[in-house]
Amino acid sequence: MSDRTVTLTFSDGTAPVTFPLLSGTIGPDVVDIRPLYAKTGHFTYDPGFLSTASCSSAITFIDGDKGELLYRGYPIDELAQRCDFLEVCHLLLYGELPSAAQRADFVTRVTEHTMVNEQMQFFMRGFRRDAHPMSVLTGLVAAMSAFYPDSINLNDAHQRDISAIRLIAKMPTLVAMAYKYSVGQPYMYPRNHLSYAANFMRMMFATPCEDYVVNDVLVRALDRIFILHADHEQNASTSTVRLCASSGTNPFAAIAAGVACLWGPAHGGANEAALNMLYELQAEGGLAKIGEFIAKVKDKNSNVRLMGFGHRVYKNYDPRAKLMRETCYEVLEATGLHGDPLFRLAMGLEKIALEDDYFVSRKLYPNVDFYSGIVQKAIGIPVSLFTAIFALARTVGWIAQLNEMITDPEYKIGRPRQLYTGAARRSVRPIAER
């Protein structure tokens, strides 16, 4: 019990109530209101949970005002520059960066699970060829519980660990399968001598008649995208995974719920929306029309929105965007696309957002979705697959959060309350009287 308290007073005659004030390692203090309903008969009202801590967590910390993101205490910029994605996966899952021996063991465990059950390709055939990859991926991830029934017990730590490795290992294979199916090409099996990101790119772009030549710059760029999207505190999809898993469902079902939530354009679909905005602007005249477009963005009476700029949490420059911007320019240089009209348009929007007082004063800086969308497009990944790439990267964060919740002695099945505004109690009249 905390020695620090907060007293809540009421104007309706309800007696004052004192609550503990809890402190985390860093970040705002939290008022522990769990006894509120029992003591007063009142709930709190917080649409969107903007002022509510739904859990305690030791995984990720965000300071939106400072533009800071930490995984297990490590700044995201240090991790992105000094580690690869599987090292970050180990950190998120087990709490510490791996030693050389631990890294080798972890990489081997993941690599040995990259193939998927052969029957999954027949399951895939039930989808239309033009189905959105996220609809396909949601179904494939949920179906894993049927293909791997030996690791679906959420309350068994060993089974949770197996399902974690399987999900991390197989997500690139499933995403690549969804892409290959959509373009009518044969699936490419994993090559276990390649790195995690290189293997994914080969499964995406190789064919039986022509192998994929790995470009180290592009592989590093994709690996960095994975790292920057691996976790992001209690966002919508992570909260969905926690809420879903709180019922005791299996890990694959909980992660499938996260994939479905991520699909929303206000969440994981933001980079797809940013690229679609660029396509629309390009079709309307490109750089020659950029001034008109910006004027519409500034017009309060206009419905035009600038996608890929600003962030719900970060009130400063998104720390992931700084890293992704650097990677973006490296990729455009390596691919020779820096002169492409679409990418020149993107850089024109970036320049305005970083210099125009309208955007600077509102801190509407380019965010990670803006740059990651440009990078993925330059690599050759179709826009419709952007959110699936995000889901691939975020899977490890979802699993880490799920594991943390299940082992928390205070965890309970999620059950938000409501402010009811419907009809008061009434009786059903006979049909002739209605």
Image (cartoon, rainbow, N blue to C red):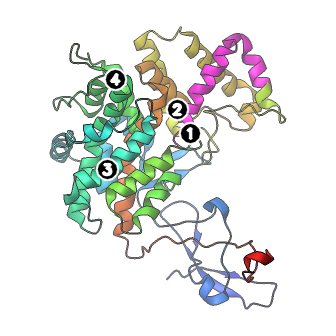
Could you say where residue 95 lies in the image, as x and y percent from the top left? 31, 56
Which residue reaches farthest right?
A: 301
Confirm or deny contact between disc 1 and disc 2 (CB under 8 A).
yes
Q: Which residue is mark 1?
A: 318
Tell me the quadrant of the picture where the C terminus can be found: bottom right
Question: Looking at the image, can residue 97 be seen?
Answer: no
Q: Is residue 189 above or below residue 75?
A: above
Confirm or deny contact between disc 4 and disc 2 (CB under 8 A).
no
Q: Is residue 245 above or below residue 350?
A: below
Residue at (74% x, 71% y) in the render: 421
Which of the marked residues, 3 or 1, is nearer the chain's N terminus? 3
Is residue 293 part of the magenta span, yes or no? yes
Magenta region: which residues? 268-295
Confirm or deny contact between disc 2 and disc 3 (CB under 8 A).
no
Q: Work out whether residue 366 or residue 166 is closer to the camera in this orientation and state it.
A: 166
Could you say where residue 404 lies in the image, as x and y percent from the top left? 36, 63
What is the three-letter code of the residue carrying label 1?
Asp
Q: Which residue is mark 3?
A: 143
Residue at (54% x, 33% y) in the render: 271
Residue at (53% x, 35% y) in the render: 368
Residue at (63% x, 59% y) in the render: 48
Q: Residues within 10 Å of mark 1 (few under 14, many from 20)?
A: many
Which of the marked residues, 4 or 3, is nearer the chain's N terminus? 3
In space, the residues marked 3 and 1 are separated at their CA atoms by 35 Å
What is the three-letter code of the residue carrying label 3?
Ala
In the rendered structure, find residue 196 and report the number of the disc placed on it: none
In terms of secondary structure, where does tag 4 sit?
loop
What is the three-letter code of the residue carrying label 2?
Lys
Q: Which residue is mark 4?
A: 184
Which residue reaches farthest front?
A: 432
